[in-house]
Image (cartoon, helix red, strand yellow):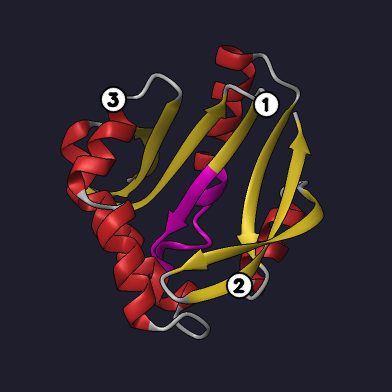
């Protein structure tokens, strides 16, 4: 059985692994492993994930197939600008095309509507990640600007866009 549910603290190690495994296929062609590893070691450290999990402005969910965690998504409410961001959305390559990414996106959109009463959801995606950009466009996102984003020693443009909800 496939589905999506809110994340639990006990999911954090599986989230670490999903992030690492998806980055190989998504970012491997244009971000060296050393830079991916450096970013992963800091941003996905268990202490950092626990802080995010315990934050009242961060929400997350996991996608599962049978009893295996195969994806995860994280959202963040930017208090200062009053913007709602999907900051992470990853599905293991072999489980893509099962609508799990769409379910996780819809999970985040529901949080944006119900908890923050906002009219749009924002996200960023690396310009080199063409399959992700195409997928987000099919989900109704409009990309308006590009900003540099640094992972380790690699800087790559990140497209920022939104979807009205």
Res. 7 visible in picture: no
Q: On the image, which quarter does residue 110 sit in? A: top right
On the image, the x and y values in percent for residue 84 come to: 62, 30
Mark positioned earlier in the residue sequence (2 or 1): 1
Q: Which residue occupies 52% across, 41% down?
A: 103
SS for callout 1: loop
Are there few (<14), some (14-19), or many (20+) residues within 10 Å of tag 3? few
Are there few (<14), some (14-19), or many (20+) residues within 10 Å of tag 2? some
Depicted 75 relative to depicted 151: above or below? above
Mark positioned earlier in the residue sequence (2 or 3): 3
Are there few (<14), some (14-19), or many (20+) residues within 10 Å of tag 1? few
Residue pointed to by mark 2: 156
Q: Distance between the residues labelled 2 and 3?
A: 30 Å
Q: On the image, which quarter does residue 57 sit in? A: top left
On the image, the x and y values in percent for residue 22 come to: 39, 67
Q: In this view, does 82 lie to the left or right of 58?
A: right
SS for callout 2: strand
Q: Distance between the residues labelled 2 and 1?
A: 24 Å
Observer-nearest of 94 and 107:
107
* Residue range corresponding to the magenta coloring: 87-102
Residue pointed to by mark 1: 81
Q: Which residue occupies 31% across, 59% down?
A: 18
Is disc 2 in contact with disc 3, using a CB cutoff of under 8 Å?
no
Q: Is residue 26 left or right of residue 56?
A: right
On the image, the x and y values in percent for residue 89 come to: 49, 50
Q: Distance between the residues labelled 3 and 1?
A: 21 Å
Residue pointed to by mark 3: 54
């Amino acid at each position: 059985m496939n589905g999506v549910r809110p994340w639990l603290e006990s999911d954090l190690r599986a989230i670490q692994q999903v992030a690492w495994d998806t980055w190989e296929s998504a970012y491997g062609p244009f971000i060296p492993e050393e830079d991916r590893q450096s970013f992963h070691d800091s941003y996905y450290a268990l202490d950092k994930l626990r802080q995010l999990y315990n934050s009242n402005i961060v929400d997350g969910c996991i996608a599962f197939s049978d009893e295996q965690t195969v994806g995860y998504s994280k959202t963040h409410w930017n208090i200062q600008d009053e913007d709602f961001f999907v900051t992470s959305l990853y599905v293991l390559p072999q489980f893509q095309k099962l609508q799990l990414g769409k379910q996780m996106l819809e999970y985040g959109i529901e949080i944006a509507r119900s908890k923050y009463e906002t009219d749009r959801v924002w996200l960023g995606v690396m310009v080199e990640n063409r399959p992700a950009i195409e997928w987000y466009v099919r989900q109704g996102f409009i990309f308006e600007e590009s900003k540099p984003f640094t992972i380790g020693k690699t800087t790559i443009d990140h497209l920022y866009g939104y979807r009205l909800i």
